[in-house]
Amino acid sequence: MPIRGKGAAALMTVLSLTAAAAGPHIEANLSKTRVYVGEPFVLTYTFSLPGNDVLEHRFIAPSPAHIAVKRALPEETLTRNGHPVYRRRYLLEAMRYGTLDIPPAYLKTARRRFAKDAWSRWETKVEWTRYASPAPAVEVLPLPDGAVLAGDLTLRAELDRNTTAAGEPVTLTLTLEGSGGLDDMPPVPLTIPGVTVFARPPEVEATVSGGTLKGKWVRRYTLVADEDFTVPSVIVRVFDLKRRQMRPLQTLPLAVRVETNGTAAAVPVKKEKKMDVFLFWPAVAAALLLGAAAGAAGMYTWLRRRRRIRPPKYDSLRALLIELFRHLDDPEARAAARRVERHLYEGAEEPDEAQIAALLKRLREEG
């Protein structure tokens, strides 16, 4: 016999409370329980929603102290015993050593609840319930003195060419690759005597595989010089997690040959002729008069044309880039140089030459 009316509502209330009392099952697991400062590890939460009466659920991740949440990976949905199981993973890095506690995460679920209103009529309400996960802890060890990163990494340096013309840019690419916290790689200073160095912002690519962070850190440097130079060795000291020891990563020196347009031809010095004394002073007076006249004419011409001076014409984007390198202390010039480089060497959209020429004109007038 079917149950209707108040009996049906009471039965539904009992079933809802029974399912809520059981609650969802929440697990918290760490890929590593002992790490070094800056060594990435993964925190995984797995939870299920027993019963079919959950209308909505919300997951609230913790904000642990002294631990950086580097990435929140996409949520995964599995099936276990006919019920959906949800998995959330977070890539973490400890910023200080010691035993660090990770606060619990919270899961809020919404269920339909039947209750009587003020006039004893049955109505449906949505009731939210909050559940807490376990709170794991991780032991963090300090990095040895001198180490900037912890991981299993390799370092290499490459030039796009080892021969160039005077004033033409050469691109140096530093690549740090492997497993480790590449997001925290500090800047690598590069100073070469007689060379203008323009460093681009680093690019970081990272993926998580089997609880291990793997990726690539790339930084490019644009080098401009008028004579031969050598890129010195670059040294990055890392703590090797496999060998449990310090390991300096070092690149080899790279020589660059700069070719000039040729040496200037020697100009023979004409032998000075002897001048008679009686012709000297009249010649001096004539020269002074001619010089004064030429100076006046030149000043008049300059005054007429001073407001019509135009910036020099540039025959190519390379010429614009070389001119921009002389104004890298200006933020707009740095941004324009970056756009030109990306077009020349990475196939990006061609920048507006007229706009860059106007920028160079303004910088010359200000400087």
Image: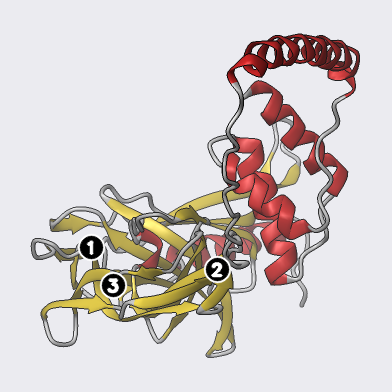
Task: From the viewer's perspective, tell me whether residue 211 is left or right of residue 334.
Answer: left
Asked which secondary structure carries label 2, the reply is: strand
Q: x, y percentage for residue 285?
A: 70, 9
1 and 2 marks in contact (CB < 8 Å): no
Q: x, y percentage for residue 99?
A: 12, 58
Residue shown at the point (57%, 64%) measured from the top left: 263
Disc 1: CA contacts within 10 A as few (<14), some (14-19) or many (>=20): some
Disc 2: CA contacts within 10 A as few (<14), some (14-19) or many (>=20): many
- Tell me which amino acid carries mark 3: Ser
- Could you tell which of marks 1 and 2 lies nearer the N-terminus? 1
The residue tagged 1 is: 148
Of 175 and 110, nearer the camera is 175
Q: x, y percentage for residue 174?
A: 43, 72
Given this view, does label 1 or label 2 mark the residue nearer the observer? Answer: 2
- Tell me which amino acid carries mark 2: Val
| Residue 170 tag number | 2
Residue shown at the point (55%, 68%) measured from the top left: 170
Asked which secondary structure carries label 1, the reply is: loop
Q: Is residue 224 above or below residue 309?
A: below
Rendered image quadrant of residue 307: top right
Q: Quadrant of the N terminus?
A: bottom right
Residue shown at the point (81%, 9%) measured from the top left: 296
- Tell me which amino acid carries mark 1: Val
- Could you tell which of marks 3 and 1 lies nearer the N-terminus? 1
Of 239 and 107, nearer the camera is 239
